[in-house]
Image (tube, rainbow, N blue to C red):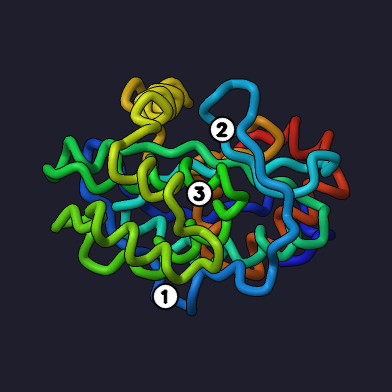
Amino acid sequence: MTAAVAWGALAVVTTGCGQGSYGTSSTGAAGPATYAGITDLPEALAADGTTITVGDPRAKTVVRLYEDPRCPVVADFESTGARAIRAQTFKRQVRTEYTFASFKDERLGGDGSKRAVNALRAALDGQKFAEYHAVLIDNQTAVEESGGFTTERLLALAEQVPGLRGEAFDTAVSTMRYQGFVTASQAAYEHTGDDPVGPGTPSFAIDSKLVSEELRGLFFEEQLAGDLLTMVRMDPVGWKNHRS
């Protein structure tokens, strides 16, 4: 697919994690979800108090990602289509926004999602969110069923991000300092789309338009995800008016 393809030709279906099902991984892992070597991307908490933004605030195209840290399909996405999103974020063509869900805890037991979301918010304080997010995703193995994002593991994984560990971060992780953020983020996720329990993870929105189920699969192929974002940047009105 190229940027010249008509909007009507877009349609690939895949599945994700939702409160109604466990979800399945649609593709094989294609390598780490790394932000290695990139330390100058602006990071901020948006005015709504639940959105973490990464990238140039002047970027005209905005991709919003809805993720639960315990969802294995999120890890699948982060090692495939997310590479294209990061590439365009690095080039300051796209700004990436994150809304974090934690429903997997309720579904499977434990509190691993909530603890991971709290730790990610704590990493934002040191402008280390993107790097720490990549580390958590790269080390997600078995956490869906085990709830394995414990305080101890979260702190140990933080060692992989230079400059992240310290009294402020460690205390925030150990005490769940950002429990309010965790709760508000889950509520924001639940209020996204038409389903009262949320759209499933990962889900995607481009320029405030939620990507339909028919187009979800594009985000699990690096080339297709990049082509779609390029098409949106070239023809934002066409994307706004596209009916999937």
- Look at 69% across and 63% down and name the residue there: 39
Left or right? Give the position of 136 relative to 153. Answer: right
Q: Kindly identify which residue carries mark 1.
A: 29
SS state under label 3: helix
How far is disc 2 from disc 3 in space, using C-alphas?
Answer: 14 Å
SS state under label 2: loop
Task: For label 1, count other residues whose C-alpha is less than 10 Å away and answer few (under 14), some (14-19) or many (20+).
Answer: some
- Look at 41% across and 56% down and name the residue there: 74
Q: Kindly identify which residue carries mark 3.
A: 123
How far is disc 3 from disc 1 in space, using C-alphas?
Answer: 25 Å
Q: Are marks 2 and 1 in contact (CB under 8 Å)?
A: no
The amino acid marked with disc number 1 is Ala
Picture layout, residue 99 above or below residue 14 = above
Q: Which residue in the rendered view is the most extreme toward the front?
A: 167
How far is disc 2 from disc 1 in space, using C-alphas?
Answer: 27 Å
Q: Which residue in the rendered view is the most extreme toward the bottom?
A: 31
Mark nearer the viewer, 2 or 1: 2
The amino acid marked with disc number 3 is Ala
Residue 126, horizontal then vertical, whole percent: 58, 49
User: Is residue 138 in view?
Assistant: yes
Left or right? Give the position of 156 relative to 123. Answer: left
The amino acid marked with disc number 2 is Thr
